[in-house]
Image (cartoon, grey):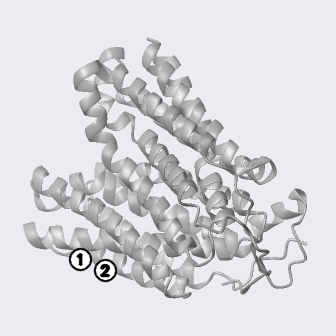
Amino acid sequence: MTELTEAPLAPRADTASPTGLIAAVCAAHFVSHYYIIILAPLLPFVRADYGVSYTEIGFAIATFNVVSAALQTPAGFLIDRVGARMSLFWGLLLGGIAFLLAGFVHSFWFLVAMFAVAGVGNTVYHPADYALLSQHVREQRIGQAFSLHTFGGMLGSALAPPTLLMMQAVWGWRGAFIGAGIGGLIVAATVLMVRDRPPLTAARPRGDNGDAPAGQAAGLLMSPAILLNLVFFVLLAVMNSGMNNYSVVALGALAGTPVHLANTALTCLLTFSAIGVLAGGLLVTRTALHAAVAGLGLVGMVVTAALIAAFDLHAVLLIAVMSAFGFFAGVIAPSRDMIVREATPPGAFGRVFGFVTTGFNLGGIVAPMLFGALMDAGQPRWVFIGVAIAALMAVATVITVPKRPRPLA
């Protein structure tokens, strides 16, 4: 990883930890994940109301992901130029209004258009969140801040289905969309009220003479370190898609696992992922060997996915192995973020995190087609083998990341 030195910090009156800022960023990440999953639990009700096919419903989800993938890197450049906090506010505002209007207007194609608008709002979350944390949280706490940020997103994913279904039961699916939109607007107001803090003096790679103009900095995105991190995020998205979206049906086809047992195992996987994120946040404060931590966690994911593919695991053992997979997946998240941060020169957090986290969108587009094709071909075992292969490839990206990024100037 990049060797870092720190310029001396000038004395400042506001030396207290930016707890309010961290909380606001975590709340924004909660909303981001909540909106990503908003259609899944409500899909049957939306489909019945509009009388459309699953393919047409899928078009709304695809539109969201394509727009996010196309615009997230430009959003990162914009955030580095105009500031992260207000960019995060406008992204939350845009997403909240989009889902609010989707609930009020009775038109399927208007719904699709609002998913596109929400996709634009979604572009700001990762670059703005990581830029704010990197600029305002001290080096000693940054790993824990990253882990809390990831935990906030996971909590959004976990709470979205039950809360959306509760709102649907009372107000219908339109009321659930409106409620989700109002929630986003409340978090947007919270971000707006967070007091601006002067950025801490950033850690600077040795040999870097200052922030480069945007045109020169764009070349950083094509450096081996950043491209490997992009591939890393694509592979993580593939692993998450395979286990989160296809494990239940794959277990049923592979070993006749009852749906309730497979769902229990998946719930344990997601729960232990969140626990693993918090454990990983503590771990990154105690070691600078972030690539080693991520590599070992990925090896654990390879082994557990391979065990599921190779053996007919029953009840307790299946739940234990799935839980272990989730824990390993969670532990690597803070180290993953630190690896990206250490490859990022000062002043480029928005564009770099915006670029590499586009891998989530790219993987989210490719993975469903890959695993869906495997299931259609009657090869459920290869869902878990595919996850194991993706994890093994991710190990290679971690251990080969260059020690220094290409200089900006």
Q: Residues within 10 Å of mark 2 (few under 14, many from 20)?
A: some
Residue depicted at 62% across the width and 40% down the height: 192
Residue 63 position (above or below residue 409): above
Write down the quadrant of residue 91 in the picture: top right
Residue depicted at 26% across the width and 57% down the height: 247
Would you say 53 lies left or right of 141 here? left
Would you say 306 lies left or right of 126 here? left
Tag shown at residue 303? 2
- In contact (CB < 8 Å): disc 1 and disc 2: yes
Between the residue at mark 1 and the residue at mark 2, the CA separation in whole angstroms equals 6 Å
- Find residue 307 and report its horizontal and vertical position in percent: 23, 76
- Secondary element under disc 2, as helix, strand or loop, is helix
The three-letter amino acid code for the residue at tag 2 is: Val
Residue 201 position (above or below residue 100): below
The answer to whether residue 192 is visible is: yes
Residue 292 position (above or below residue 38): below
- Find residue 275 and report its horizontal and vertical position in percent: 32, 68
Q: Residues within 10 Å of mark 1 (few under 14, many from 20)?
A: some
Would you say 318 lies left or right of 123 here? left
Name the residue carrying label 1. Answer: 307
Residue depicted at 84% across the width and 76% down the height: 407
The three-letter amino acid code for the residue at tag 1 is: Leu
Write down the quadrant of residue 173 in the picture: top left
